[in-house]
Amino acid sequence: MDLSYYPGCTLKTKSKNLEDSAIASMTALGINLVELPRWNCCGTVYSLADDDLVHHLAPLRNLIRVKEEGNGRVLTLCSFCYNTLKRANLLIKNDQEKRNTINSFMEEEADYEGEVEVVHLLQILRDEIGWEGVSEKVVVPLQGLKVAPYYGCTLLRPQEVAIDQVERPTIMQQLLQSLGAEVVDFPFATECCGSFQIVGNPEFVLDCAWNILSSALRWGAEALVVSCPLCDFNLGQRQREISNRYSEFREMPILYFTQLLALSLGLGAEVCRFDLNYVDPRPLLESKGLIR
Amino acid sequence: MRIEISAKRLQSDFVKKVEEISGQTLPSCYQCGKCSAGCPMSFAMDLLPNQIIHLVRLGLEEDIAKSKTIWLCASCLTCSVRCPRGVDLSRIMEALRLITLRKNIDYVEPSRIAAEIIAELPQIALVSSFRKLTA
Ligand code: SF4
Ligand code: SF4
Ligand code: SF4
Ligand code: SF4
């Protein structure tokens, strides 16, 4: 099966590890991700102002490209892209007045009414392949690996775009269990990492990261599993600094769920691009006999 | 803190503007504080999120302008999904930021970020920060 795929900009630069491992895993599971021939940055954040329509154009143009390709849905990997595309689509679908304004402003485009469905990879794994379908294909079970799923914000909030229960999601836990891993539940799984505040207020984001990571460590996690490139950066990139500030801290790899998926499907370490992870996960994975 | 409440402030353009941009009904809030209890950035804020909404509806624009709170909000939407009164506080925060940003005043100044830091940050961080915190 072919599925139209919107990568977004971070996956083409800093987060090739997310993209490469996702594409390879999906191919192994029988789904071909076909990148849109034309796309633009979605703008990352969804506009929260009633009188600001212009910032919805970037996500909507991408959805119009999907429709032009003759496809009814589009897949995203980045949590932020998912959120922004999904919300812009809901807006144009449900708000007739804004839909008319936006369509008449984009007069060079064909009218768009929200026909394209926006999905995240985790939903395809759960709803179409199914956890059993995933576990049947596992050749390297992640036995003995203690991982804590971390959801962050944009896959779960607001309610109308949540891919799972807002306060108690289990979707990543179920995936990781299907891969044979030991899943650690911890209270900060849906707490925001500080997001874009990393640019203007990095010291506060360091505190957010410390809260999240130290909780996961206390509950016994050896690695954190994420889906968002910004979570990955905020939680991974400055762990050295956290260690300097808090002597009891131990560095902990942050992995994309797709990297663990690819590994357990037997696709090999190369496709996972572990060299791009901020804290090298290879010593941990070697110690569990999962890579050589 | 001594607060002066006057009809002029309560019905000021500022209050109307916040309601208009955010699409939220300010009197709905009953000051339970649930938004502040769950806010991941509250540890760094000088005014708590529930205090911000209260000051807005009293029309106390200057007190909000003196505070850093609206600039520390990460738009994580935790407050929005938890409010028992259905108030979307993240939109009120956005409206307050926009009132300043639309005067062409930036909170983050891209030209002052060191080149090494820019090279290190993923696109997603830069784009979202500039979208949220620059004019
Ligand atoms: S959300 Fe990120 S990765 Fe997605 S298109 Fe926009 S900046 Fe790029
Ligand atoms: S980067 Fe932070 S804001 Fe984004 S989803 Fe991750 S936790 Fe939320
Ligand atoms: S949670 Fe809602 S009702 Fe309670 S203080 Fe916050 S905004 Fe007001
Ligand atoms: S959206 Fe802003 S105010 Fe609300 S909980 Fe998140 S950081 Fe706090």
Image (cartoon, grey):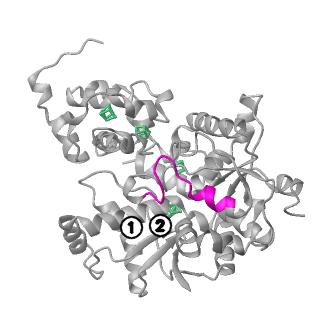
Q: Please identify the quarter of the rendering in which residue A70 is found.
A: bottom left
Above or below for B106 versus A22: above
Residue A122 in the image: state x and y as whole percent.
56, 65
Alpha carbon of mark 1 to alpha carbon of mark 2: how far? 7 Å
For the residue marked with disc 2, what is the amino acid? Cys
Residue A277 in the image: state x and y as whole percent.
73, 56
**Residue A172 belongs to magenta span:** yes
The magenta region covers: A162-177
Task: Point out which mark residue A41 bears.
Answer: 2
Above or below for A246 versus A100: above
Neighbor class of circle 2 (other Cα within 10 Å; few <14, some 14-19, many 20+) is some
Q: Earlier in the sequence, mark 1 or mark 2?
A: 2
Residue A227 showing in the rendered view = no
Q: Secondary structure at mark 2?
A: loop
Q: Residue furthest top?
A: B2
> B85 and A21: which one is in front?
B85
Above or below for B53 versus A75: above
In the displayed structure image, the side of residue B72 where residue A109 appears, left or right: left
Neighbor class of circle 1 (other Cα within 10 Å; few <14, some 14-19, many 20+) is some
Residue B135 showing in the rendered view = yes
Q: Are marks 1 and 2 in contact (CB under 8 Å)?
A: yes
Whether label 2 lies within 8 Å of ligand 1 gets the answer yes
Residue B62 in the image: state x and y as whole percent.
27, 25
Q: Chain of mark 1?
A: A
Q: Which quarter of the image is occupied by the N terminus of chain A?
A: bottom right
> B83 and A98: which one is in front?
B83
Q: Please identify the quarter of the rendering in which residue A141 is found.
A: bottom right
In the displayed structure image, the side of residue B6 where residue A251 appears, left or right: right
Task: Count numbered badges in the picture.
Answer: 2
For the residue marked with disc 1, what is the amino acid? Ala
Residue holding disc 1: A58
